[in-house]
Image (tube, rainbow, N blue to C red):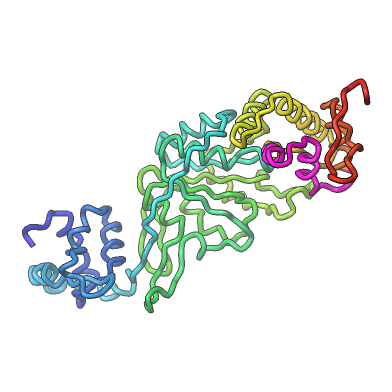
Amino acid sequence: MNDLKISTKRIVEELATRYPDETQFRKATIVETAKALGFRGPDFYPLLDPDTRVKIGTYDLSGVIIPIRENMPQNSAAAMPNANVAQMQSIVNEEKTYAVKDETFVPWGPFHDVVKMIKSEMFYPVYISGLSGNGKTFMVEQACAKLNREFIRVQINPETDEDDLLGGFRLINGETVFAKGPVLKAMENGAVLLLDEIDRATNKIMCLQGILEGKPVLVKKTGEIVKPAPGFNVIATANTKGKGSEDGRFTAASIIDDAFLERFTVAIDQQFPSRTIETKIVVKHMEKFGETDLGFADKLVTWADIIRKTFFDDGVDEVISTRRLCHIVQTYSIFKDRMKSIEMCIARFDDDTKVAFLDLYSKVDEGIDPLATDEVTGEYQKFEPEEL
C-alpha cells in the first residue's frame, strides 16, 4: 500500500467508504469513483493490475482496501448507509472524439468569433440560427478541429429525452448499470457539446436547464453529482430562433421555452456567405472531386445569389443553399453535364419551381438550353450563344 501514490490511496479510501462490505470491484466502478474525485487515468491505473483481476472487468482490491478499512474510524462506513444506493454503479464510454479538419472548409462569417469563444475555455453557451445548408454545424465542427478540442455532437429530434442526453439504465454483461449519456460525458471531459437542430426538440430537453447555467448536475437515477470540467461548453444550432416556423418551411421546428433560450449567453444569426466566399467554397469542392471549372463555379454562385434575393423578396418559396451547390458539384463530377447535375439536385422542389430555376440558370449560362435534351441519353445539349 505504501507503494501507491496519494491520489491512488484517496481513490481506495473512497471505495472503502462507498462500498464498506466489498473487496472486488468492476473496472467501471473504480473509474467512476476516481473521476468523481477529479482524478484521471494515471491515478487509477495502478488499481487495474492484471495480477488482481479475478474475471474480465473485475478486480480484487482486498490487498489494499482491507488495511485502509482497518485504519478508518469505526462508524465512518456506517455513516453512509445508503452509499450503495446513492452511488450505484455507472459507466461511460471513455472513447474521445475529435473533429477532423476538412480541406474544403473556408473560414468566413462568425467562424473566428466561435474560435475565440471555444479557445477561451469559458462556459459560454451559444445559440446559432440560420437557414438550412449554410454551414452552421460545419463551422462549429471545424472550429473544434482547428483547436484540437474534443467534440461531441448530439442530433436532436422530437423524441430526444433525458435518457438520450443524460443517460439511463442498460443491461451490460448481465448486470444493470447506469450508462452516462453524451451530455454527462462532455461535462466530465471538458468537451464542446453540439446540440444540433435544437429547435426540433420538445419540453423533454428541459433537463438541460441547469447544465446550461454551467452548474453541477444531480443524476437523479444514481444520486451522483457530475461537475463540469474546465473547457466544457454547449453550442446549439437551429434553423429558427426558437419561435417556430410561421412560413411552414421547417414544419418540425418547435417553439422553445423562453426560460431555456435565456440561458444561452449569446445568439448568432448566420446568413449565407458572400459571393466571393461561396465561390471559394464551390471551387474547393470541385478540387475535391477532381472537376475544377471556374466558369461553372461562378455561374452556380450567381444563379444561387439571384434565387436568394428573389426568395427574401418573397418572389419564390425555395432557396438554393451552399450545401445544395456542393451537391451539384459532386453530381457534375459524375455526369459531366451542368444542366443534368442541377436538375437532379433540385428535383425535390415542385415542378413549377424546378422549371423556373432551370430556366433562370439557362439565362445565367448562355451556353445551355434547358429544353434541349438528347432523346436517347437524356443529356442536355449545349449551344453556342448565337444559336439560341
Asked if 58 appears above or below 180 in the picture, the reply is below
Which quadrant of the figure has residue 340?
top right
Is residue 73 visible in this depiction of the protein? Answer: no
Residue furthest front as drawn: 376
Q: Is residue 378 visible?
A: yes
- 351 in magenta: yes
Residue extending farthest left: 2
Give above or below for 291 relative to 67. above
Q: Is residue 220 left or right of residue 239?
A: left
In this rendering, is residue 7 above or below 129? below
Left or right: residue 253 compared with residue 236: right
Image x and y of residue 49, in percent: 18, 64
- Residue 267 in picture, x, y percent from top left: 58, 38
- Image side of residue 329 versus residue 66, left or right: right
Report the residue at 84% width, 26% height from top.
367
Q: Which residues are magenta?
A: 326-352
**Residue positioned 8% across, 69% down in the render:** 67
How many circles with numbers are drawn on the protein?
Answer: 0
| Residue in the foreground of this view, choosing between 77 and 228 | 228
| Quarter of the rendering occupied by the C terminus | top right
Which residue is situated farthest in the top direction here? 386
Q: Which residue is drawn at the image coordinates 77% and 35% (left, top)? A: 338
Q: Quadrant of the N terminus?
A: bottom left
Q: Main secondary structure of the magenta part?
A: helix
Q: In this image, 118 relative to 75: left or right?
A: right
Q: Residue at x 51, y 30 (%)?
A: 113
Q: Residue 347: image x %, image y %? A: 80, 47
User: Is 286 in the magenta?
Assistant: no
Quarter of the rendering containing residue 303: top right
Q: Position of residue 257 (x, y in %)?
A: 62, 52
